Image: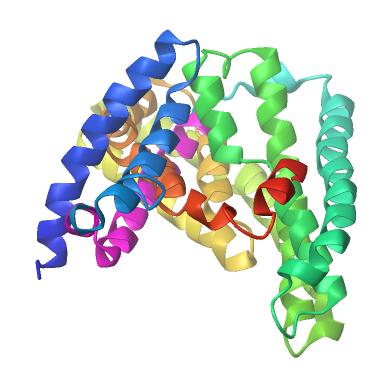
Amino acid sequence: MREPLEAVLVAIPVVVLACGIAGAAVRRLGQPAVVGEILVGIVLGPSLFGWLWPEGSRWLLPGEVLPYLGVLGNLGLLVFMFLVGLELDPGLLRGRGRAVVAVSQASLWVPLALGALLALAMYGSFAPEGAGRAEFTLFVAVALSVTAFPVLARILADQGLHGTPVGAVAMACAAVADVVAWCLLAVVAAMAGPAGAASGRQVVGTAALAGVFLAVMWWGVRPLLARAVERWGGSGAGPGAVVGLCSGLCLAAYATEAVGVHALFGAFVFGAVLPRVGVVEVAAERMREFAVPVLLPLFFVGSGLRTDVGLLLGGGAWGWALGV
């Protein structure tokens, strides 16, 4: 049995090279690279490689190595979402506030309602033992209504749309909808636990803390960062600038994770409040050069690695999948 480090050192080059090849192939078909990265995960996972050659699959990607790849992929995702926030031009959203609210809420509540109807029909066949109808229905509905925020950001970046008005509105809508969805997931968690009656207080608390975080970042941290960059930015984008950006990004990500919203929102907001000046942009580009081509694909490959198409072969599961 190999040490985890040995397994990681074998898995990373195989996965990254495969993602590069698949990304180039799907781009020739007019698709974003993230589609190829997810397909690589499906091919290398139990759906194909693990089914055709289980021993080879266990050697290349043993189960104990997947959490390590997941951590590395999530670090790449945080850096990527920070870069997306940094490149977001708030001026593109000026005068579009009503559109953002309307589109974000429609994109959440319409699929939520349809997902709830589907969950009611699925309850008898898929609900685990002991799960109540209400929490099962709400969980499935929320799961089907959550926007794949990182996937959307990657698609917009690959297509060169992240700096356009359409891209800015799409990102803002996804961010608003996902914050609401995370609050609803807090309700599901409270309903499933022993303190189900506290679900209302929990969602209000999550929403309030998320609002406090945004207010502190925009009216407190943003001007402090602007003054800090103005004072010390003249020394150039040395290692200290990269360390500072990484530290701030991790602290912001931790803050949102702690209040019950995914860490990627903290990274995104930290990028959005940074001043767009030379020293910041140069340091951010240095982070991009490693994180995006090497670490980020590990996150999207993980989605495919956790997918086992074989589980859909019985019990009419394909019909339910088509319904979803």
- Is residue 205 visible in this depiction of the protein? no
* Quarter occupied by residue 106: top right
As drawn, 163 above or below 309: above
Percent of width and height locating residue 304: 44, 45
- The location of residue 176, given as percent across then percent down, is 74, 42
In the image, what residue occupies the spot 46% across and 47% down? 303
Magenta segment includes 67: yes
Q: Is residue 204 magenta?
A: no
Residue at the extreme bottom: 194
User: Would you say residue 312 is visible in this rendering?
Assistant: yes
172 to 140, vertically: above or below: above
Taking depth in this image into account, of 51 and 188 the one nearest to the observer is 51
* Region of the chain picked out in magenta, as a range: 57-85
In the visual, does 306 lie left or right of 239?
right
What residue appears at the point 41 percent right and 48 percent down from the top-left corner?
47
Quadrant of the image containing the N terminus: bottom left
Q: How many marks?
A: 0
- Which of 203 and 87 lies nearest the eye of the viewer? 203
* Quadrant placement of the C terminus: top right
User: Residue 69: where, in percent of width, then height?
Assistant: 30, 54
Q: Classify residue 172 by image quadrant.
A: top right
Q: Is residue 280 left or right of residue 252?
A: left
Residue 3 or residue 185, whichever sits in front: 3
Percent position of residue 110, x then y: 88, 41
